[in-house]
Image: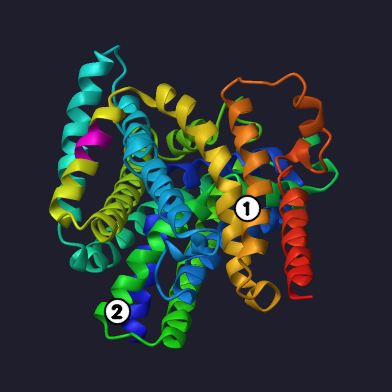
Amino acid sequence: MNKQTLLIGFTLFALFFGAGNLIYPPTLGIEAGTSYWIALGGFILTGVGLPIIAVAAIALISNKTTELGTQVHPLFAIGFSSLIYLAIGPFFGIPRAANVAYEMSIIPLFSEPLNQSFLLFLFTVIFFIVVYWLSLNPKKLVDRIGQWLTPALLIAIAALSVGSLLILDSNVQAPNEKYQDNPFFTGFLEGYLTMDAIAALAFGIIVITAFREFGITNRREMVIFTIKAGCVAGLGLALVYGSIGWIGAKMATSGTFENGGQILSSAAELTFGYYGNILLGIIVALACLTTSIGLTVACGQYFTKITKISYRWIVTLVTIVSFLIANLGLNQIIAISVPVLVAIYPIAIVLILLTLIPRLVGTSKRIYRYSVMLTAIISIYEGLNAFGIYITGVQPIIESLPLFSIGLGWLIPAIIGGLIGWLVDKQKQN
């Protein structure tokens, strides 16, 4: 079982490691400077730890993702889970991955202006044919990704990291204002913004299904093996984040950059010349491909379970919708996706945390309901803010919440909601 656990761990690493995970650490490195390693510790705690904990939580609750919300209400569980799968799947996540792969692996190869719309169309046709083909048989997903795509991805990342670290010899600069006072907590928040905890709710099904096919049915064993696979994936993510983040720290004197993608592109070109862009393109394409395959399979398995429609038809529909939305372009997709993710991510975190503290929460539906309700009020309003919608009378109240300025305005209301539910339970018992 050790070999199977290692393979599933490699698969989980590749599923988590999308293009967004590739471009966040270099930005952290260039901004944190001499405080990089402290900031990285905070980043890994939430960027790696929280998603792995979320996968373990899925294994803990009888292997049914919808049970995360069942304590609130069965219909809420199905509705919220469906919203998550649609958001990280065909509506936003998969199309965004295809666009990032196109912009970082194809566009840099051409020096002359091109018909971007037509080139994007051709690229997405090929990209989604591969995604569809590799998603049709989920039983082979672990073999295809764990044995082939993950090693190829790791080799490409290692080549870029080692080459850059040997050639880039500039001194690490002092941290910018953002990382001067509390670099660990700032890194902690940056890791939270990767939003991999939502993806973990989908990838958990893939991991559990894979272990079931290897004969693991006991819940306790399932949790143990899931945690082991999660540790494999987490170690890989931590090593990759550390190395490419350090590249960012060493690039501080090499120019001004708008995002982590530009940092890595410049580092790749400085290290390997024109072929550096090809190497980075391979890394990004593989990262986006594996994530898109995992999300397609997860959507197929989930919606097949709740609708009883055949897996092939669901995967076909997910692929077609993803292809159509991908051709809208990256800017349009991000403009719509960010507010939706801002609205649903805190609710997902609260459900995960409540699942992991059963001794404190027990089977109390009221604790779940009040905590989720107050969290949803704040997070949905922040989602509306991200869309540019503000309510004059409400805005000052929301902004006065503790931790609002750092994106955690929902945290105290979530705790208060849980306490209200607990007090109501106590009153009913008396």
In the depicted view, which residue is nearer to us: 60 or 260? 60
Does 360 sit left or right of 55 as displayed? right
Marks 1 and 2, Cα distance to the nearest angstrom?
31 Å
Magenta segment: does it hold 55?
no
Question: Residue 7, located in which quarter of the rendered image?
Answer: bottom left
In the depicted view, which residue is nearer to us: 295 or 313? 313
Does 74 sit left or right of 283 as displayed? right
Quarter of the image where the N terminus is located: bottom left
How far from the left and from the top, in percent, is residue 178? 77, 37
Three-letter code, disc 1: Val
How far from the left and from the top, in percent, is residue 65? 42, 63
In the depicted view, which residue is nearer to us: 122 or 110? 122
**Residue at the (50%, 30%) spot, across then down:** 262
Determine whether the residue tagged by mark 2 lies in a helix, strand or loop. helix
Pointers 1 and 2 in contact (CB under 8 A)? no
How far from the left and from the top, in percent, is residue 284? 37, 42
**Residue at the (40%, 54%) spot, across then down:** 78
Residue that label 1 marks: 372
Does 277 sit left or right of 262 as displayed? left
How far from the left and from the top, in percent, is residue 340? 51, 35
Residue that label 2 marks: 212
Of labels 1 and 2, earlier in sequence is 2
